Image (cartoon, rainbow, N blue to C red):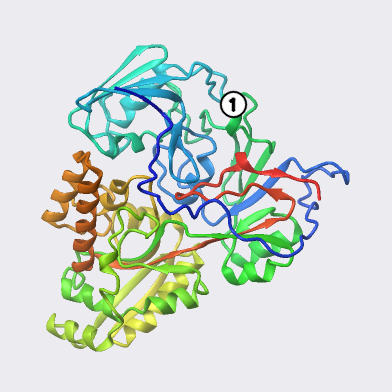
């Protein structure tokens, strides 16, 4: 059957909270910027936009990167067969349409014939073939992605037709195809990335900034940007970000609620749910966290409201699962209030597990995320009430990615897990065999459900499976699911078009300046 590629994941993201926020106050004239910015006349609009991220890119190669900040920037540079809009709906990307066979196993993608890579090379099916050979590990090397394990064969039918055959039906397969298509044979992605997106990579100075420039040859007029240059500064200190906004060094940036309130008179303030889970992750494989009673005790000892009020000034949604309620169809709302704060219950469980006198626990947190550090400090005070002696250890972001995320060499951590367009990408993180299961959670029934949901094409049945997965995670206290913090952005008044997405993405192509 024939399908045009203008379809939705609206069932996944039925709460449309991502389009705009609120604005208030008068603007500050922030035309003055850094020394390397050209002086503008009063009537000439700026042609550069500057913002900040709080962590270094973990890799410039999109197949190697896992960090949200990195994806938020480089999704402007790279594209897949599909892209997504602000509602989480899939839209035509490098494939303008596709066909799927009656048995749901063969996908034929019809590629655009007017796409130019940033190095001037025309994109053809040879590039897509090269991409999927790497992603699925069909080139004799280790697969670059775990999302394509059901790919049985791939074929470039002609220059602009590409075919993928699966070994079994996959409900999450289409959403996986937002992954970056890269030019055949190009091996310098980690030094100088080459994609097809509306912005091109220009420069990365470690510890300072990433610079992008407008792709004048971009193929899709409706997604083409207007700002010529984008500078993204790496700034780990929140007060420095505020200072840079006030001085005009930055044009917009993510800020805390307190800082947003301080800036509201001179900047537009945008605020939205993020579809993010702030999680207190526990390493389920080490003592005493390998005892479910200890993990449950920690859940009872934690007061999430104190974090929501103390760290996020009330602008966050309390969670009980590894889903945000933004994922309305899949979110299990029956889990709410599973672990009310109950110090005596926590002590009782610790005594039952043989830890009546408590134990020592290290919370390892990336130093560049102040909200997670502050959350860890609150948890330290709360856990002290049940005899758990907490040491909060802050480490560099690159070290956290290596030690915690990649190698699970830690006891506990506080981090934000970004939402995804497909529920398998969210809950699959806890599958026993998942390579980045840094929780070291393992449950046979859970694994069975995850595997069954991947091939279940009935959306109602699939949602029920994911709800049961959430129930298992909560009952087994795999972690403490804290909250979905709102994203708050301060933006100079003459810069328009800032758009929220249900995943990490700063869409520079929608930004433009307006005369005041």
**From this viewpoint, which residue is outermost toward the top?**
158
Q: Quadrant of residue 125?
A: top left
Label 1 element class: loop
Q: Quadrant of the N terminus?
A: top left
Please say if 223 is above or below 506: above
Q: Nearer the viewer, residue 345 or 394?
A: 345
Q: Nearer the viewer, residue 201 or 446?
A: 446
Q: For the point 54% across and 21% down, which residue is it?
A: 116
Q: For the point 79% across and 49% down, which residue is it?
A: 35
Q: Quadrant of residue 132?
A: top left
Rendering coords of residue 107 (x, y %): 29, 24
Rendering coords of residue 430 (x, y %): 24, 54
Q: For the point 12% across and 55% down, which residue is it?
A: 445
Please say if 60 is above or below 101: below
Q: Nearer the viewer, residue 216 or 496?
A: 496
Look at mark 1 in the image and give the residue it sits on: 218
């Amino acid at each position: 059957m024939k399908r045009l590629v203008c379809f939705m994941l609206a069932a996944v993201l039925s709460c449309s909270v991502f389009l705009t926020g609120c604005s208030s106050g008068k603007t500050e004239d922030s035309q003055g910027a850094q020394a390397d910015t050209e002086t503008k006349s009063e009537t000439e609009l700026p042609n550069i936009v500057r913002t900040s991220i709080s962590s270094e890119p973990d890799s410039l190669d999109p197949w190697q990167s896992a960090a949200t900040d990195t994806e938020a920037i480089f999704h402007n540079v790279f594209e897949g067969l599909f892209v997504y809009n602000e509602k989480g709906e899939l839209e035509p990307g490098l494939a303008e349409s596709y066909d799927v066979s009656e048995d749901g196993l063969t996908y034929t993608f019809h590629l655009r014939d007017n796409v130019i890579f940033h190095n001037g090379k025309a994109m053809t099916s040879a590039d897509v073939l090269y991409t999927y050979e790497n992603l699925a590990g069909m080139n004799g090397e280790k697969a670059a992605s775990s999302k394509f394990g059901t790919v049985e064969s791939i074929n470039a039918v002609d220059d602009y037709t590409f075919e993928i055959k699966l070994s079994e039906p996959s409900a999450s397969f289409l959403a996986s195809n937002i992954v970056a298509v890269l030019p055949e044979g190009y091996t310098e992605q980690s030094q100088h990335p080459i994609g097809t997106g509306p912005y091109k990579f220009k420069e990365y100075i470690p510890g300072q900034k990433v610079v992008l420039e407008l792709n004048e040859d971009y193929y899709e007029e409706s997604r083409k940007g207007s700002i010529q240059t984008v500078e993204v500064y790496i700034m780990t200190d929140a007060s420095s970000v505020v200072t840079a906004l006030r001085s005009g060094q930055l044009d917009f940036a993510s800020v805390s609620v307190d800082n947003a309130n301080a800036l509201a008179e001179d900047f537009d303030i945008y605020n939205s749910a993020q579809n993010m889970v702030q999680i207190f992750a526990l390493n389920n494989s080490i003592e005493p966290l390998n005892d479910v009673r200890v993990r449950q005790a920690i859940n009872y000892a934690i007061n999430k409201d104190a974090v929501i009020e103390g760290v996020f000034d009330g602008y966050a949604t309390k969670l009980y699962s590894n889903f945000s309620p933004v994922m309305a169809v899949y979110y299990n709302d029956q889990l709410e209030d599973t672990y009310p704060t109950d110090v005596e219950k926590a002590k009782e469980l610790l005594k039952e597990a043989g830890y009546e006198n408590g134990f020592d626990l290290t919370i390892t947190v990336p130093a560049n995320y102040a909200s997670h550090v502050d959350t860890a400090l609150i948890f330290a005070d709360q856990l002290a009430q049940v005899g758990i002696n907490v040491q909060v250890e802050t480490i560099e972001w690159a070290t956290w990615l290596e030690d915690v995320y990649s190698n699970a060499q830690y006891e506990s951590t506080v981090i934000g897990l970004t939402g995804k367009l497909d529920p398998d990408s969210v809950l699959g993180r806890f599958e026993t065999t998942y390579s980045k299961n840094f929780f070291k959670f393992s449950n046979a029934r859970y694994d069975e459900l995850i595997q069954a949901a991947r091939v279940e094409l009935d959306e109602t049945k699939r949602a029920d499976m994911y709800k049961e997965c959430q129930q298992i995670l909560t009952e087994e206290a795999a972690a403490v699911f804290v909250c979905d913090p709102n994203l708050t952005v301060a933006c100079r008044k003459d810069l328009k078009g800032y758009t929220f997405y249900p995943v990490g993405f700063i869409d520079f192509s929608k930004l433009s300046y307006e005369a005041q």
